[in-house]
Image: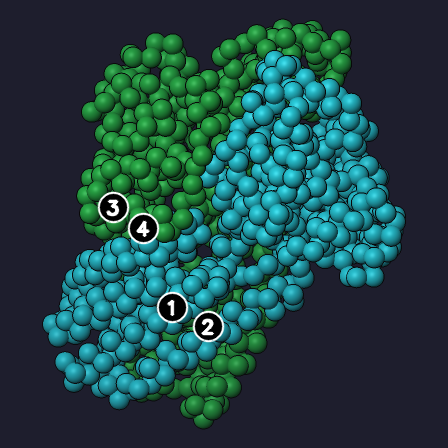
Chain colours: A green, B cyan
């Protein structure tokens, strides 16, 4: 750990610009391995991890062969999940000693990140090589994925509430095996329960004779070991935390979560919401196009079923369309605007649920407001549409029909847009993942049915 | 600042649960002001800011009247932008001394956050009340919104590169007016240029006689004063920074950006992407429904224009639809699946641009891959659709037509989905904001045109 720090301190890295990436890729294409290695040697481990995500599987192997062994642990922890699943598994099979070395060097949360998705045999082989770290890692792996217990690190500094500031400082100086980076110390009572946190800046400025508990912040934000990482991230950003203690069922301090791990969680969760709303899953740039296509096909398949559902509604009015083809011309407008209005309400509701600003408490206020917004915009758009339709087809009744259908569909869109994600969340489903298909199906079906149904009654 | 810290340390706060919010709202509704104030007094400033976002304007005033004056500065800095614009402006007009007090207590970045959107007269009135802070705040306001210079704080700790660790520690102990929280010190040369950062944890563990530069990390991540906050956030999350020095054009250290401010930026930017992709702008829960409706109407209006464009394509084939109404039944399927496929490519491209994994370097690889994915899924979906259409209408040529149209539209969708955001980014526009309308218009127009056009040639 100490050597690691020394290396970081003297290393001069260059930024990973697009031009730099282009140089690496063209050296790879031309099989100039020496050039590739030289280019890679100047990068920060996090940037090397990014480069690995931009190249094919066989090229990944080539790149990994030329990175400095002491950088490998940091590179591996910076890989995003899907890359890690492939690269670490492959290394674990071919060179398990490299992974074991990494586990020894890394903080426990990063070590767990490397091992959690390995197959059982590979993981067992590596754990046998690291007897000192084994118990802690196995304990972390007991906690469910995405829980506080899984993402916390076990390396932390705790001091007794009876200590003075001077004792704490002497203790810190005497320890060789401290965490790689820390911002706060934790004061614990005799039952190992955290009773305060001390920022290093407070410690430095306090008198040596002062009791450490007297310079501690006693308003603790305790994280239960089973808390979901999304809720942990919310606590960090809400209360501007830099680190937070994790406790077990008895209230004892078992780990710490640091802010840099939480930044990753915040990005991941937001990214997940965007991808799910867009109907794409956990694909990455290094997936083959066949894998990507298969991952996206599921969602498209669901949409195909709902598109046929909408087509069946239209088929119900085949006779009417035959009599008046203008209906076929105008009907997609009603469905399309309804779809867009529904997406707006849905987006607002999904974000409000994610940021905890939409709760059962204010649900009725929000639903009422969305309905009013839908009604108001429905009226404005209905007027515009009716006007254009009148100029086009010179049929006042047709304009009336499309206007009425549009108001109806916009209100439906607004209501479903907000209610569907709330219901999904209530039943423990992710509102981002399936709301879109429910809402767009509804606005298509209601849009076609309202327009063609009203036309049948009023026009024909 | 010192009293502030003391208060935080002894204050016990409760969590803002939905039940707690309900209690506050029902006390507000029943005009039980004392209860409201008691409930509010137990909350963390960040939670009080959230409560302000859930209530009407007149209720906001009622709530603000009962918060402890020493909590007000922290509450105001935790408000999100739109709430701040209203609440701080109103306070600045009615009780400018409260805002001036807040400016004195807060770090410079938070003070700037309060003042940046005030009207000129109110801001000037407050700046006159804070002569000590005035110059720094005016300097920060010179930098554009969302730049490093605007979000940095001027309070930081810098030490000369000739100092020893002992000198630094004595200096820290002797200063009364240190920043509220800090994790790193900056070592500067005689021209005030940063040459290293020292983590407090390294300082604590070093010998007093050591030169401070020898325990510093010299691989600095320097932030230029004009760097966009999105790029700053990228640096923080890429290199796991807790703080980073901001430099002016001469390379001199002028401020520092801390990780807790960056968490807000990461959340804001992701939130912005989601909202823009969903066609909603910067609305908040406390906007009236009329304001919300107006904000959303612009986007719906654009979509109305494009929907009429698609309708005009259909109108071009009125005769053909009159001859064969099945065309009207099936045509929305082609457009709808194309729209979903386009949204998938678009989502992937917008995210890849935001996370810098899609650059001019690998653009051709990505475009090629999307085209292949579109082709492959287009074929699979075309087969399924043709089959169902055959079972339904028993017309093999109709099945052929819808299958061909679907493959064409899926390839178009995939290509436009990735190219449109890239082109928008190239021309300096936000790819999230307008890509959707381009892509869905294209898939509608191409979908209807390909299906009806092929039907005209092959079927009729």
Judging depth in this view, the residue of B392 and B92 nearest the camera is B92
Mark 1 or 3: in front is 3
Measured as percent of width and height from the top left, residue B358 is found at 36, 53
Judging depth in this view, the residue of B158 and A331 nearest the camera is B158
Q: Residue furthest bottom?
A: A394
Q: Which residue corresponds to mark 4?
A: A22
Q: Secondary structure at mark 4?
A: helix
Have a look at marks 2 and 1 and say if they share a chain: yes
* Sequence order check, earlier mark of 2 and 1: 2
Q: Residues within 10 Å of mark 1 (few under 14, many from 20)?
A: many
Q: Which residue corresponds to mark 3?
A: A27
CA–CA distance in space, label 1 to label 4: 32 Å
Q: Secondary structure at mark 1?
A: helix
Looking at the image, do the residues carrying marks 1 and 3 touch, with CB atoms under 8 Å apart? no
CA–CA distance in space, label 2 to label 1: 9 Å
Q: Which residue corresponds to mark 1?
A: B440
Measured as percent of width and height from the top left, residue B23 is found at 71, 40
Q: Secondary structure at mark 3?
A: helix
Have a look at marks 4 and 3 and say if they share a chain: yes
Q: Residues within 10 Å of mark 2 (few under 14, many from 20)?
A: many
Chain letter of disc 1 in the image: B
CA–CA distance in space, label 3 to label 2: 46 Å
Tell me: B168 left or right of A347: right
Which quadrant holds the N terminus of chain B? top right
Residue B303 is marked as 2
Q: Residue at x 84, y 39 (%)?
A: B69
Looking at the image, do the residues carrying marks 2 and 1 touch, with CB atoms under 8 Å apart? yes
Q: Secondary structure at mark 2?
A: helix
Measured as percent of width and height from the top left, residue A374 is found at 55, 66
Mark 4 or 2: in front is 4
């Amino acid at each position: 750990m100490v050597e690691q720090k020394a290396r970081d301190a003297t290393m001069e890295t260059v930024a990973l610009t697009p031009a730099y990436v282009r140089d690496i890729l063209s050296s790879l294409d031309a099989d100039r391995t020496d050039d590739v290695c030289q280019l890679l040697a100047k990068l920060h481990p996090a940037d090397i991890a990014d480069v690995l995500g931009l190249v094919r599987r066989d090229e990944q192997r080539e790149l990994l062969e030329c990175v400095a062994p002491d950088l490998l642990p940091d590179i591996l922890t910076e890989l995003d999940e899907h890359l890690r699943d492939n690269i670490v598994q492959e290394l674990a099979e071919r060179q398990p000693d490299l992974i074991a070395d990494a586990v020894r060097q890394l903080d426990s949360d990063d070590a767990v990140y490397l091992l959690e998705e390995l197959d059982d045999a590979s993981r067992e082989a590596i754990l046998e090589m690291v007897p000192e770290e084994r118990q802690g890692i196995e304990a972390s792996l007991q906690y469910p994925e995405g829980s506080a217990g899984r993402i916390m690190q076990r390396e932390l500094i705790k001091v007794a509430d009876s200590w003075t500031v001077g004792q704490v400082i002497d203790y810190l100086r005497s320890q060789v095996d401290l965490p790689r980076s820390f911002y706060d110390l934790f004061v614990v009572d005799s039952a190992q329960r955290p009773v305060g946190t001390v920022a290093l800046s407070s410690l430095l400025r306090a008198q040596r004779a002062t009791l450490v508990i007297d310079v501690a912040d006693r308003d603790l934000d305790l994280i239960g070991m089973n808390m979901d990482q999304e809720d942990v991230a919310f606590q960090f950003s809400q209360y501007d935390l830099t680190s937070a203690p994790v406790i077990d069922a008895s209230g004892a301090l078992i780990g710490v979560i640091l802010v840099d791990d939480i930044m990753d969680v915040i990005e991941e969760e937001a990214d997940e919401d965007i991808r799910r709303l867009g109907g794409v899953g956990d694909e990455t740039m290094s997936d083959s196009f066949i894998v990507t296509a298969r991952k996206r096909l599921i969602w498209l398949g669901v949409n195909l079923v709902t598109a046929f559902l909408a087509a069946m509604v239209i088929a119900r009015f085949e006779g009417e369309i035959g009599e008046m083809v203008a209906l076929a011309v105008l009907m997609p407008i009603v469905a399309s605007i309804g779809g867009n209005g529904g997406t707006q309400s849905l987006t607002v509701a999904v974000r409000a649920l994610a940021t905890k600003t939409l709760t059962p408490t204010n649900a009725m206020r929000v639903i009422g407001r969305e309905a009013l917004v839908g009604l108001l915009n429905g009226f404005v758009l209905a007027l515009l549409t009716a006007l254009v339709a009148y100029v086009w087809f010179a049929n006042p009744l047709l304009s009336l029909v499309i206007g009425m259908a549009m108001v109806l569909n916009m209100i439906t869109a607004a209501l479903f847009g907000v209610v569907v994600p709330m219901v999904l969340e209530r039943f423990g489903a992710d509102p981002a993942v399936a709301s879109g298909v429910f809402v767009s199906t509804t606005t298509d079906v209601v849009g076609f049915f309202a327009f063609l149904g009203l036309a049948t009654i009023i026009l024909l």
